[in-house]
């Protein structure tokens, strides 16, 4: 009887211990499942909010584009909404322009919009309304999504849409309607943004996007996995919470639920997530405890029959317990080490608000002063800001919150995400656990990422004429942009993982041109592409662009970026220019032949009469000069001078004409040697005059030695000529370096000079600033010098003062490859 009682007692105690341990493990497993679910719910909430904001941004950008138009019409709407068609907007059926029309102006509005490019538009107003809202322009985004109201339908018939329109017009911010039904069919929501006339601020209408919430939700959320059972999106209306979209996951128990608010524009939706929290640890522990109980009962029974064997069993059990204790202590040490090394701050608070334990991360976030104060004192103690009154009240009373809550605030200058969870035991508050995460840097990084994405979108929208896509190291297409699709005609699914060769002509592909281009880009970093390409419809066009190699950190080629542009029109224009140039060269050759014929006529047909006039006049003066009086001999001298001057003019014209056709021979010329040689040739012109010549250092120039010699001879000869009336003549030849580093040569004298008002005549044929009686000349020399300098790519100009001399400047090319140096 005693043994039975002992065995029965042992069994009861074992069952109680096993049940308690199973209950504890069940709670631990549920806590872990709840933490995992919280992270997934937060990620789903962020995904829905981000997706909704993207739709709102599309409305704002489209409204801004329409406001920039002088008038909203069909063509302008098509251009303004073109980028929308390239965006991924799941559930979006269309983007419309909605016109607000008073009841008395429906007929006039219908006629007006037909003139703006919407022929056949029929406006169907709802009865009993003072103002109507008609979709008049539309760009379809997804024809498979739930259809929007047909163009011309009065959206004012729906109170849900009317309320959103009035909010958008009144506030100026995007507004979202409640889901509405028409004919018993569930309709989508309508997102609206007002459009104003920038000249006077008057209302032009609204940009509206029709969004089917089930498709929006399915396109935004990932497929549920693991213990997720279902995700439901609901909207709040007058009748309460109404589910509008649901995604089902795995089957099983659904004892864990979370609900979070989702703000999209001016509407607050609710996201409900259901997950399973059951496990098998508690059942296993219970069975293990039951087995242990039976073993213990057997030991007690055996003890009653054999004390020695029982003592041995007790000794063995004691040893096992010691090992289990050591393992438990080791596990506790590992848990403590793990809590000390995690990036989140964790702290435990008792029911009175006193901090029982906090890890190093929490101590760094809160500071050492937090450990000695109650949690209700933290908002003022730790300078916690950016919280509303309700959040502060919840933080002060977190021990009585009853469930988990979350808030983001600023603690000691850092933005901290705080997750609070109350611990309740036997229906009474037992304390709380808080998890603190510093999100300052991640929020800043997210903001920078958003700004970068916006900038990238702007750049891509602005690069509509360029096809940009990526290739892998082997030349297979990795990404495909909308602009590439528009230029090449292929959809992304047709070219992804396909060969780069398909865009080349059959001849270029057979010769291995695609592989050579990629190999050259890999070797040099980038390579220009300029040649024919083939579209999907087999039409050939001319493209120009770059292939740039993208490398890994170790220098290996990661892939290639191809940026190309259709330059067919420019190529055609180049061909036309080439043909025109060829035709022009032909005409120049023909005109040159005519000019040479004219030069021959001038040289022979005109010179002969002039020589005859001069010869007979000379003979008349020699043989019959005595028979003429003084006036007759003077007339005869003027006849000879005129004939000789005419001959000089003809020589000058022929030289000017030959210069046009004379081919330049570019050589390196030493200007200092050339000046010295020309100065020696002017010995007769100088006579016995005392002229001081100063020649500075002259850098070498590049050009035709014979022609440059003519320029120097003309300028030095003019300097000698126009200083004949100066008692102490001075001529200076030198150079100076301009701000751009080029050499400018000059010839300066202190002679007669000239009036700068007439400087524009200096370099024209037969234009002279001095009388022929005072200074001889034909008026062609400076014109020849000007044309020679121009043909060398230089410039020539002058600066002078009457009675104080003149300075002539000219430039010649110098920075050229090393050539033969020529001295005169």
Image (cartoon, rainbow, N blue to C red):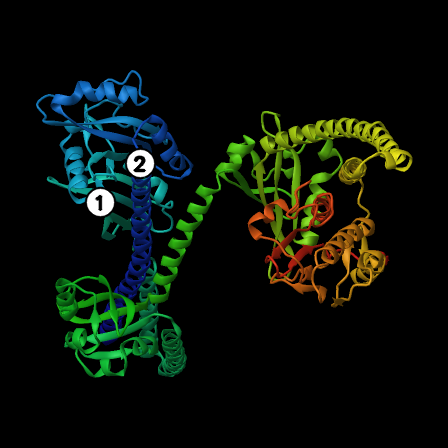
Which residue does the numbered mark 2 point to in the structure image?
66
Choose top left, top right, bottom left or bottom right for residue 816: bottom right
Q: Is residue 736 above or below residue 768?
A: below
2 vs 1, front mark:
2
Label 2 sits on a secondary structure element that is helix
Q: Nearer the viewer, residue 426 or 568?
A: 568
Choose top left, top right, bottom left or bottom right for residue 414: bottom left
Check disc 2: other Cα within 10 Å, few if <14, some if 14-19, many if 20+.
many
Label 1 sits on a secondary structure element that is loop
Choose top left, top right, bottom left or bottom right for residue 349: bottom left
Numbered label tally: 2
What's the residue at 35%, 45% (across, down)? 221
Expressed as whole percent of the image width and height from the top left, the position of residue 345 reads: 31, 72
Upstream in sequence: badge 2 or badge 1: 2
What's the residue at 39%, 32% (across, down)? 79
Q: Nearer the viewer, residue 205 or 684?
A: 684
Judged left or right of residue 454, residue 723 is right
Residue 496 appears in the figure? yes
Quadrant including the C terminus? bottom right
What's the residue at 64%, 60% (across, down)? 805
Whether pointer 2 and pointer 1 mark residues with C-beta atoms closer than 8 Å, the reply is no
Quadrant including the N terminus? bottom left
Judged left or right of residue 398, residue 663 is right
Judged left or right of residue 79, residue 664 is right
Distance between the Cα atoms at labels 2 and 1? 16 Å
Judged left or right of residue 519, residue 265 is left
Q: Which mark is residue 173?
A: 1
Expressed as whole percent of the image width and height from the top left, the position of residue 306 reads: 36, 80
Check disc 1: other Cα within 10 Å, few if <14, some if 14-19, many if 20+.
some
Residue lying farthest to the left in this orientation: 128
């Amino acid at each position: 009887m005693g043994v039975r009682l002992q065995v029965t007692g042992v069994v009861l105690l074992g069952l109680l211990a096993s049940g308690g341990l199973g209950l504890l493990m069940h709670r631990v497993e549920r806590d872990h499942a709840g933490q995992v679910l919280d992270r997934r719910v937060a990620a789903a909430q962020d995904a829905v909010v981000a997706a909704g904001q993207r739709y709102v941004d599309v409305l704002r950008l489209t409204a801004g584009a329409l406001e920039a138009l002088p008038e909203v019409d069909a063509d302008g709407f098509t251009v303004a909404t073109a980028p929308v068609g390239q965006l991924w907007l799941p559930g979006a059926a269309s983007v419309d322009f909605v016109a607000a029309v008073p009841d008395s102006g429906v007929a006039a509005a219908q006629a007006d919009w037909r003139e703006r490019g919407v022929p056949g538009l029929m406006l169907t107003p709802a009865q009993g309304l003072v103002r109507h809202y008609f979709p008049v322009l539309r760009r379809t985004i997804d024809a498979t999504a739930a259809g929007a109201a047909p163009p011309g339908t009065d959206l004012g018939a729906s109170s849900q849409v009317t309320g959103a329109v009035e909010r958008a017009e009144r506030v100026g911010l995007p507004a979202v309607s409640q889901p509405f039904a028409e004919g018993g069919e569930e309709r989508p929501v309508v997102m609206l943004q007002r459009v104003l006339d920038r000249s006077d601020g008057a209302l032009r209408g609204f940009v509206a996007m029709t969004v089917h919430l089930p498709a929006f939700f399915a396109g935004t959320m990932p497929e549920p996995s693991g213990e997720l059972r279902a995700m439901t999106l609901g909207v709040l209306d007058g009748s309460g919470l109404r589910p509008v979209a649901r995604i089902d996951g795995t089957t099983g128990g659904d004892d864990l639920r979370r609900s979070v608010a989702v703000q999209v524009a001016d509407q607050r939706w609710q996201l409900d997530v259901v997950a399973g929290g059951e496990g098998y640890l508690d059942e296993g522990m219970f069975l293990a405890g039951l087995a242990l109980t039976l073993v213990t009962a057997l030991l007690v029974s055996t003890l009653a029959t054999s004390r020695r064997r029982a003592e041995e069993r007790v000794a063995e059990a004691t040893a096992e317990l010691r090992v289990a204790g050591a393992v438990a202590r080791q596990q506790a040490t590992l848990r403590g080490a793990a809590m000390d090394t995690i990036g989140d701050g964790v702290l435990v608070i008792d029911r009175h608000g006193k901090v029982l334990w906090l890890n190093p991360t929490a101590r760094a976030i809160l500071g050492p002063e937090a450990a000695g104060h109650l949690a209700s004192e933290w908002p003022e103690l730790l300078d916690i800001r950016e919280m509303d009154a309700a959040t502060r009240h919840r933080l002060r009373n977190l021990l009585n919150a009853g469930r988990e809550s979350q808030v983001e605030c600023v603690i000691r200058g850092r933005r901290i995400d705080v997750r609070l969870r109350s611990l309740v035991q036997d229906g009474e508050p037992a304390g709380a656990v808080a998890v603190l995460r510093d999100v300052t840097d991640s929020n800043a990084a997210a903001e920078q990422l958003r700004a970068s994405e916006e900038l990238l979108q702007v750049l891509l929208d602005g690069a509509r004429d360029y096809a940009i896509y990526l290739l892998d190291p082997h030349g297979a297409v990795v990404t495909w942009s909308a602009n590439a699709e528009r230029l090449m005609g292929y959809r992304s699914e047709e070219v992804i993982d396909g060969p780069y060769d398909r865009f080349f002509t059959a001849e270029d592909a057979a010769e291995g041109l695609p592989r050579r281009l990629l190999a050259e880009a890999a070797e040099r970093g980038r390579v220009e592409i300029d040649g024919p390409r083939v579209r999907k419809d087999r039409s050939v066009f001319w493209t120009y662009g770059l292939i740039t190699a993208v490398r890994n950190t170790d220098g290996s080629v990661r892939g290639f970026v191809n940026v190309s542009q259709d330059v067919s029109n420019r190529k055609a224009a180049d061909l036309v220019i080439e043909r025109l140039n060829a035709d022009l060269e032909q005409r120049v050759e023909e005109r040159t032949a005519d000019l040479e014929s004219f030069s021959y006529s001038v040289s022979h047909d005109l010179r002969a009469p002039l020589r005859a006039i001069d010869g007979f006049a000379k003979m008349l003066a020699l043989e019959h000069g005595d028979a003429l009086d003084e006036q007759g001999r003077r007339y005869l001298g003027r006849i000879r001078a005129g004939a000789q001057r005419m001959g000089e003019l003809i020589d000058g014209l022929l030289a000017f004409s030959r210069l046009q056709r004379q081919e330049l021979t570019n050589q390196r010329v030493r200007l200092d040697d050339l000046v010295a040689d020309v100065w020696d040739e002017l010995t007769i012109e100088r006579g016995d005059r005392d002229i001081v010549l100063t020649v500075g250092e002259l850098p070498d120039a590049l050009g035709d030695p014979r022609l440059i010699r003519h320029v120097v001879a003309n300028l030095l000869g003019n300097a000698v000529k126009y200083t004949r009336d100066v008692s102490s003549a001075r001529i200076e030849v030198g150079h100076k370096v301009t701000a751009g580093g080029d050499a400018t040569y000059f010839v300066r004298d202190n002679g007669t000079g000239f009036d700068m008002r007439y400087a524009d005549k200096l370099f024209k044929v037969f234009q002279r600033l001095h009388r022929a009686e005072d200074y001889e000349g034909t008026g062609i020399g400076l014109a020849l010098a000007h044309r020679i300098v121009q043909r060398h790519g230089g410039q020539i100009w002058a600066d002078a003062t009457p009675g104080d001399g003149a300075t002539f400047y000219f430039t010649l090319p110098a920075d050229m490859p090393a050539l033969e140096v020529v001295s005169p």
